[in-house]
Image (cartoon, grey):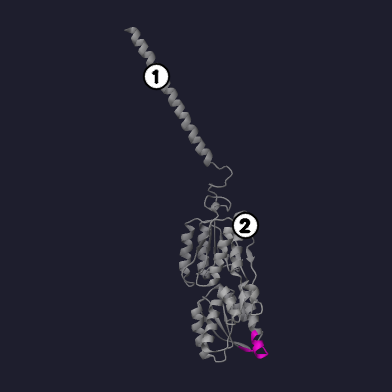
Amino acid sequence: MNRSCSIGKCVDVERDVIVKRVSLKRGLLIGLFLLSLVGCNSNPSGSKGATSSTPSEGSALSQRVIAVVSPAKTSPFHVTLAAAAAEEAKRLGLPPIIDQAPSSESDYTGQVALVQDIIQRHPAAISVCGINPQALVNIIKDCNRADIPIFVHNQISPVEGGGKVVSYIGYDEYEGGRKCGEEAAELLKQKYGTYRGNVAILDGEPGDHTNLRAGGFKDALKKYPDIHIVAEQNGHWLRADGTAITRDWLQRFPNLDLVFGCSDEMALGAAKAARDAGRQLLTIGIDGNRPSLEAIRDGKYTACLATQPDLIGKTVIDTINDYLNGKKVPPVVKTQCVIVTKANVAQFLK
């Protein structure tokens, strides 16, 4: 009886030892597994997975997703620019860009709301062409608060009102307007043999884009006292408005010689109004979209400032990519613009 009890105790002791050994092995295996998970997710170098907000760090920023925000897609200029940006991102091996815009170039509150929504998607950077200064200042401040690098394209003049912009990318709008003014003067000289004539201006929506373009144009004409600006009106960047306004001008000003549009779309509308009325009218605008170039080639449009939106779109992506790769980028990245007439349009249509 006593022996059987001692044997039972021995059996119990051996069983306890086996259980403890199994538990110890399980504990070691679980510990090693958890340690391996920590090792996989640790990141002492501070690259992918880190919480830092510097351009080369952070899980969101390391995705390299770039957002390009336009004022609208009613103009071929913004369509071409965004398409070129998307193509350049693809060429560089970047993720597809976020390409968005409000429905119209007068919806500045819509553009601000759109960018606020994009911010929630945590892109690596945002480049925006602001509708007007108020919208642009709000967008810049929103991006600054979210610690998302903000770039401004199709504008090189710094926006007033605070906020940090990494780079302004585009052509000199004032200089472009001035070039159009000089070209307008030469066109009038070809018509009359001297610098004289009557000119009207189709403005875009109020803001820096209109102020700089129209301002440069008017300043260029100041040295020609016999060239008179007889009318100026907001065409809202739209071809239809350019047509309607010019139709009215042709009735009010029988001696109107030339219409300058702060965008090609409005100036092309002016050209259509003149054709519909059977009137000879010189027309010049700013953008250099393919439809504008084709109209110049076909004799339906006089001249334009080719701002090369495809080049601007490519430059936007190249500049942002350099910044995200830790390179120093200039505060202003200026692209070229040139006057196009029937004499040189072929080289731009290749």
Label 1 or label 2, whichever lies nearer to me, is: 1
Q: Is residue 264 above or below residue 138?
A: below
What residue lies at 52% left-to-right and 66% top-to-bottom?
137
Graded by Cα atoms within 10 Å as few (under 14), some (14 to 19) or many (20 or more), the crowding at tag 2 reads: few
Q: Is residue 324 above or below residue 248?
A: above
Secondary structure under tag 1 reads: helix
User: In this orientation, which residue lies closer to the viewer: 304 or 145?
Assistant: 304
The CA span between labels 1 and 2 is 67 Å
Q: Are marks 1 and 2 in contact (CB under 8 Å)?
A: no
How many numbered marks appear? 2
Graded by Cα atoms within 10 Å as few (under 14), some (14 to 19) or many (20 or more), the crowding at tag 1 reads: few
User: In this orientation, which residue lies closer to the viewer: 157 or 315?
Assistant: 315
What residue lies at 51% left-to-right and 36% top-to-bottom?
36
Is residue 255 visible from the viewing direction of this image? Answer: yes
Left or right of residue 172, residue 31 in this image: left
Can you say which quadrant of the picture contains the C terminus? bottom right
Residue positioned most to the right:
193
What residue lies at 37% left-to-right and 13% top-to-bottom?
9
Q: Position of residue 97 (x, y in %)?
A: 53, 59
Which amino acid lies under the numbered mark 1 shown in the image of this protein?
Answer: Arg
Residue positioned most to the left:
1
Which amino acid lies under the numbered mark 2 shown in the image of this protein?
Answer: Asp
Q: Position of residue 261 (x, y in %)?
A: 56, 79
**Which residues are the magenta region?**
187-197
| Mark positioned earlier in the residue sequence (1 or 2) | 1
**Residue 15: mark in rendering:** 1
Is residue 215 inside the magenta stretch? no
**Residue 322: mark in rendering:** 2
